[in-house]
Image (tube, grey):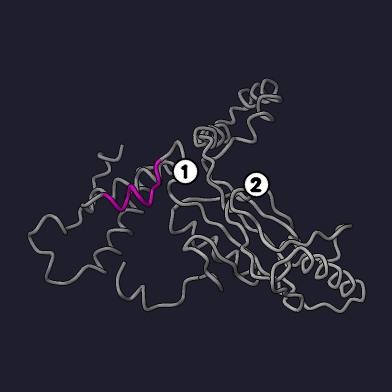
Amino acid sequence: MSSADKESPSYPQFDTELTPSYGYVGTWEDAKAMKEFFELQKALRFPALRTSTSFGKTDILKGKRKKYKWAEADEYVAGGAIPYDGVPFIILDKNIYECEYGVDHKLKRKSLRGNRHNQENDAEGNTQKKQAAEIEKRKKRNCPAKIRMKEIMKFPDFQIDPDTRYNRNKGAENLNAAIAQGAVRGERRIYIYFPPDSEHRGHELRSQVCATKQHVDGRVLCLIDHLVEEGVTLAEEISQQISLCVQDAAATSQPGKDGADGHTKLSCPEEADIR
Ligand SMILES: [Zn+2]
């Protein structure tokens, strides 16, 4: 946004960047921070589709047979392949997170218990819970965009050169022997793939919508959309949020530029407009 943002190195970044949306970090904490920053930037949540509690700390001896890899081919891997560099590696685990507008995995479960559940809810007059479920249901649009994380272990001591079948087989053999002796040095990496905007389907991207609106009033409308979608429906609460936002914007806008010029001036909508 401003030059101040560029100077500040405080946002999470890849340890090694292969493309702006693909690279790796060394720890689960760094991977998590990058995911959270991406979600914030895109104004989208990516709930977990497949995760494990040991991710980022997976034991290399877990699993029966080690399958050493030297490279992955782009065409066979969804969301970023690991390029060849002569160093063998094993894939330890994968985490997948899908766009909040993704497939409704609860749909089947919902329809199975549907009738009995609904009757009970109606009898109880439990409308709040129903409303929340409705909002969640409306949101799902089978968007295929996913964040993919891959935890791997690289074995730099077993680097080969040149890349021949013989060298690969020999390398794997040596590596097996070293692992069996418990004397192997590994470098843990978590590769992260962030989906480009073009991967989203069936919904608009809030960050895009908000960025294309020229006027502050447009941003306010956008904020209202967002709040309504989040389930905030009380007019009072919405105008409170907008006031906070307007105060923020007023505090950061340049002095002397405001004045009578309506374009940069911020106005708070009346409660009646919101309803
Ligand atoms: Zn999406």
| Residue depth check, mark 1 versus mark 2: number of the one nearer the observer | 1
Say whether residue 255 is left or right of residue 93.
left
Q: Magenta stretch: give its range.
A: 204-212
Q: Amino acid at mark 1?
A: His
Q: Is residue 136 above or below residue 79?
A: above
Q: Is residue 63 left or right of residue 249?
A: right
At a point 30% along the width and 74% down the height, the residue shown is 3
Give percent across and percent down for residue 240. Answer: 34, 53
State the residue lying farthest toward the left: 260
Give the quarter of the image for residue 271. Answer: top left
Q: Position of residue 124 (x, y in %)?
A: 63, 27
Mark seen at residue 49 = 2
Ligand 1 within 8 A of label 1's CB? yes
Q: Earlier in the sequence, mark 1 or mark 2?
A: 2
- Foreground of the two, 121 or 254: 254
| Image point (36%, 73%), residue name | 5
Give the quadrant of the N terminus.
bottom left
Circle 1 sits on which residue?
200
Task: Examine the image and state in which quarter residue 82 appears.
Answer: bottom right
Query: x and y percent of residue 212 in the render?
Result: 27, 50
**Magenta region's main secondary structure?**
helix
Residue in the foreground of this view, choosing between 61 and 84: 84
Question: Label 2: few (<14), some or many (≥20) within 10 Å?
Answer: some
Q: Residues within 10 Å of mark 1 (few under 14, many from 20)?
A: some
